[in-house]
Amino acid sequence: MVPAPSRLLARHRRPIAAILAGLAVTCGLLAVRSPAGVEVLAAARDLAGGRLSSADLMVVRLPADAVPDGALRPGAAAAGRVVTGPVRRGEPLTDARLLGPAVLAAGSPGMVAAPVRVADPDAARLLSPGDVIDVLAAYEGEGRQAYPVAQQVRVLTRPPSRADEGGALLVLATTPVQAAQLAQAQAQGRLSVAIHPR
């Protein structure tokens, strides 16, 4: 005689309840377990470049094999650092995107970051990080003839400039000698740029 379903259920009620309780605990643990991946800092919005604030940063989780080399992790001192160029929202931030040794390491050994102010902000707006330029200086009393001061130097960043500052600030990768020449020329004349084709 085949047992009735209600009797079968009553006989196996405890094992079934134990199985269901185990499934519920497993589902609960899966729900609260942190998702797999590595947390890194990324841009919280589109950035044009310039100094980072804490509002510019967010934490994203990436698969371990998708984390770029030099990615900044939560807790890294990123606020206050300077981004050398545009960054898209959600893009992970790496040491190669921030002004510092990693950016200069891409050039020749012994390079320095030299901030210079060029006279024409519209000319500076034509530049992007990575552009190669010549810096020219025009001095008072010399018929406004321009002289090359630093040739074939790379633009690291173009920080945002205020309208009341006059001109536009550029940060260039130069040798220490070029940096000294640029500082002297900036103190004595007006700087302009010539852009090398890419």
Image (spheres, rainbow, N blue to C red):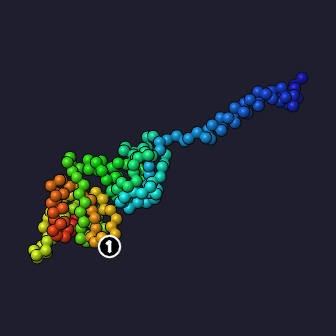
Residue at the location (26% across, 47% down)?
105
Query: In the image, what residue occupies the spot 28% across and 67% down?
Result: 168
Most extreme residue toward the right is 1
- Residue 64 lies, in percent from the top left, at 45, 40
Report the side of 88 relative to 36 (left or right): left
Q: Quadrant of residue 57?
A: bottom left
- Circle 1 residues within 10 Å: few <14, some 14–19, many ≥20: few
- Above or below — where is 44 with respect to 101? below
Query: What residue is drawn where x is 13% and y is 74%?
Result: 140
The foreground one among 79 and 88 is: 79
Q: Which residue is mark 1?
A: 164
Give the number of marks.
1
- When the figure is inspected, residue 17 is found, relative to residue 118, above or below; the finding is above
Q: Nearer the viewer, residue 137 or 67?
A: 137
Drawn side of residue 197 relative to residue 143, left or right: right
Residue 1 in percent (x, y) is at: 89, 23
On the question of residue 120 being in view, the answer is yes
Is residue 121 visible in the rendered image? The answer is no
What percent of the width, then of the height, locates residue 137?
Answer: 16, 68
Q: Please, what is the three-letter code of the amino acid marked with disc 1?
A: Asp
On the image, the x and y values in percent for residue 167 come to 27, 70
Q: Is residue 190 left or right of residue 58?
A: left
Q: Quadrant of residue 12?
A: top right
Q: Name the image quarter holding the C terminus.
A: bottom left
> Which residue is more in the foreground, 108 or 117?
117
Element on which disc 1 rests = helix
Residue occupying the point 33% across, 72% down: 163
Q: In the current view of this chain or complex, which residue is farthest to the top?
A: 1
Give residue 158's quadrant in the image.
bottom left
- Relative to 155, is 192 above or below? below
